[in-house]
Image: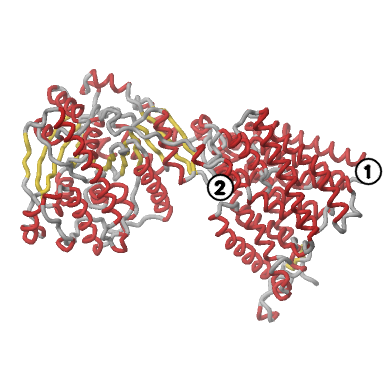
Amino acid sequence: MPAPTVSGFNATATGVFATGSPWTPEGLSLFFCQLVIILGVCRIIAVPFKYIQQPRVIAEVIGGIVLGPTLLGRWTWFQTTFFPPASMAFINLLANVGLLLFLMLMGLELDLSLIAKKWRTSLSISLTGMSMCFALSVGVSTFFYRNIDGLSGLDFTNFALFIGVAMSVTALPVLARILVDLKFLKTPLGTVVLSAASVDDAAGWTFLALVTALLNASSPIVALYIFLCALAFAIFQLTVTKWCLQKVYDWLTDHYHGNTNKGSHSISEPMVLISFLVCLASSFVTNAIGVHAIFGAFIAGLIQPRTNEYHVKLTERLEDTVTMLLLPLYFAYSGLKTNIGTMSDGLSWLSLLIVLSCVCFGKLGGCTAVARFALKFQWREALTIGALMNTKGLVEIIILNLGLDAGIINARVFSIMVLLAVCTTMMTTPLVRFFYPEKLWAERVEETEPTSPPVLDHKVLMVVPDIQFVPGLMTFMQFFKGSASPSSIPEDDAQKLVNVEMHAARLINLTGRMSAILIASESEEELVKRDSVINAFQAFAHLRRIRLNPHVVVAPENDQALQLSKVAQANSLNVLVVPWHPTDISFVTNKDETGLLSWFTSEMSSSAPSSAGPVITPSAAKSTDEFYNPPQDISIEQRKTSKNVGTMVYQLIKSCPLRIAVLVDRGFAIHVSSDPVISILVPYFGGPDDLEALSLALKLSEHHRSDIHVLHISLLDHSKAVEDIQPGLHSNQQPSSATLADPIPSLENMIGLDHPGRGDILASLKQIQSNDSSPIKIRYTSVEVEPVLFVNQVLNQIRSESYALVICGRTLNVPSKTTAAQGDGESKHKTQTEASSVHDTGADRASLASHQSLLIGGRVPMAEKILGPLGAAIVKSDVGNAGLIAVRKVKSV
């Protein structure tokens, strides 16, 4: 009895010992080998295409062309060994299953509400481009029909309609990914193009259904019956079936999650099964009517419930399998049927040039004209709209395969039109960059003066990049509504509580995935309503009586810092609080500690005045075992999240002209929730970042019983330090310190005249001192240490007391000393200018020192780049669960 077959595919397993060959032309082993070859070649070709910002579908089509009769298929051994004709049936079957699922994804991706919002603009652009392409397709079809061999026996009406559809469509999925790469997706222009492309997409499939009906009909009246039946079925699906699916979804949501958890990120398996069954049944009906099965799959995607982002979650489940495995198989199969060798004469290339010129004139020119003259877009914007609407990509490939399988076109026209799709798609990104460079449309963050706004005016934007950072940020919010009893808080402070302005920005990474694009296409209001993390923050803020303004920022990784800066400036905010969990702790070994200490030493030494003495050499530093925790077990996902968030934070530090506070949660929620008095340590070296750290400590303590400990660290004279370095560095002796009963005069001398925010800080300190009922207590400790021991001093101080929070400056630069005697305006102006110069120079040296670190391999870990040397040392040390906030002052301009 012969083995069962599927369209000629032998499903019986084979083996080298049984047959002497690892596979047979109809064996399963050969199919696995074909999958590896197809996916491997497509991925290899996609690598260089990624660097020139070309969509992956182009690499997949070209990969199929490379494997087909155009290149490798001309090698007889390769063709007969890996892609014999008997093995192609199963590839075709699996590729068509992938095509059905992909059309369902396209239906899920199509947002009809987006068309409704921009219907006038969308219809104007879409119908103009399609009508001009259809008009020009008459001439192109006539030229093809009369001059290309093998077309004379085909029906000219069907052929002309098919060429018109192929010329007029716009590839919505490819266009959406190009918009993401070009950062256009969330712009008004991107919204217009996306809505117009959606109209093109829907109209294109409708026209193709008409062409298919004409092809499958024996007479015009039969074609009319087929089309009307398909139209009636589509209306039935979009009304009755859609209503039934929504009811089933609501019932299953209540049954599996309950009324309190309808917004859960999970979706029930029965609902997923029902969605698949609807897709298969709809495909069966449209195929039985006489139009292709893909139309049923497309309609099935359109009617899926949109409640609680079900369509997004269903897309997340499907898209990896479809786009990573099945769809490349389909496009590779298309490439295997493409033989550019048939275009060996000048007529074929002339035909390609003619159809390419007509498509560009009709689509690019037509959409540009209506956008410029009817819709009043600027020339650059109109040309950009035309270039984007000219994208063909995978939709055209699908249409061409349907036409070739149905016999509407021959292999030569198929090859010409495939090259047309490749050319129009590849030219989109370069044309858009030429017509409308990013520097002309991208909104820039306006630089602000370092002295503005006032130092004690904190309007906070908390960034929520991932759910794992929620506990630390919620604990941070509690500082603005203290856990102390209301009677312990003065009435004036209680009144201030109502006026605290806080914002929370949920950060969502925008990738090329369909699910991410679906999320990005929604309005911010809808995203705020549906995002569970933002909802949790709002509920928490309501319980703590804090006014919280929510935001959702959807942006690619390289644009997140800019978008967050825009949100902050649009709402007149001046402090960005960004959480981060460093995971490069385990990369640092005992062998690295000498280099890290040397970097600390060079950082402090380069920031000190040049007349202070010689710089301590790195060889003078010796490693100590108390700096770092032992390596911790950190998951790959945590490392990836930390790396991505760390990159975003570092971009903010480098480019954002606002205050940055990086929050590292080491478990300090225990202190805030249980201790009646919150202890805060502020290491103070004298730089502008340290002043910001002190002002933030005062702001966070407004509504708490707080104990602020200011640890003022001064460096010993370098000549003395070098003289005493050998006996002093390795000993366990503690540097001398002096704690003053009245901290205000000492703090006044510590801050100095050169700081722009000095008056605000001192006024706040004096108000605290004069108010006996103030919940804030200030302590001041002054120490002098050798440069290489200042980290030890801070760490020992943290260990000696149970601090809930350590707030330190990111940059450790020491300004030039000024005295109170410099009172005249000229001297004060000179002093401030010199101090500013020292600050900038110190910051530059700090940056230079970080790049010239003596760590092994010359690599500065991410913790040092973001938190600075002192903050990194605190995070990497065994100092309990005190939280850390590293502060960076307003970026200098």
Tell me if 505 is positioned left or right of 247 in this view. left
Percent position of residue 420, x then y: 72, 52
Do the numbered discs 1 and 2 sit on residues whose CB atoms are within 8 Å?
Answer: no
From what the image shows, is residue 745 above or below residue 289? above
Q: Quadrant of the N terminus?
A: bottom right
Q: Secondary structure at mark 2?
A: loop
Q: Residue furthest front?
A: 826
Residue 647 percent across, percent down from the top left:
39, 48
Query: Nearest the camera: 95 or 661?
Result: 661
Q: Which mark is drawn over residue 512? A: 2
Task: Please give the residue where the numbered disc 1 appears in the rendered image.
Answer: 219
Who is closer to the viewer here, 564 or 508? 564
Q: Is residue 303 visible?
A: no
Which SS class for mark 1? loop
Residue depicted at x 73% and y 45%: 359
Q: Position of residue 559 (x, y in %)?
A: 46, 43
Residue flagged by tag 1: what amino acid is it?
Ser
Tell me residue 443's x, y (percent).
47, 35
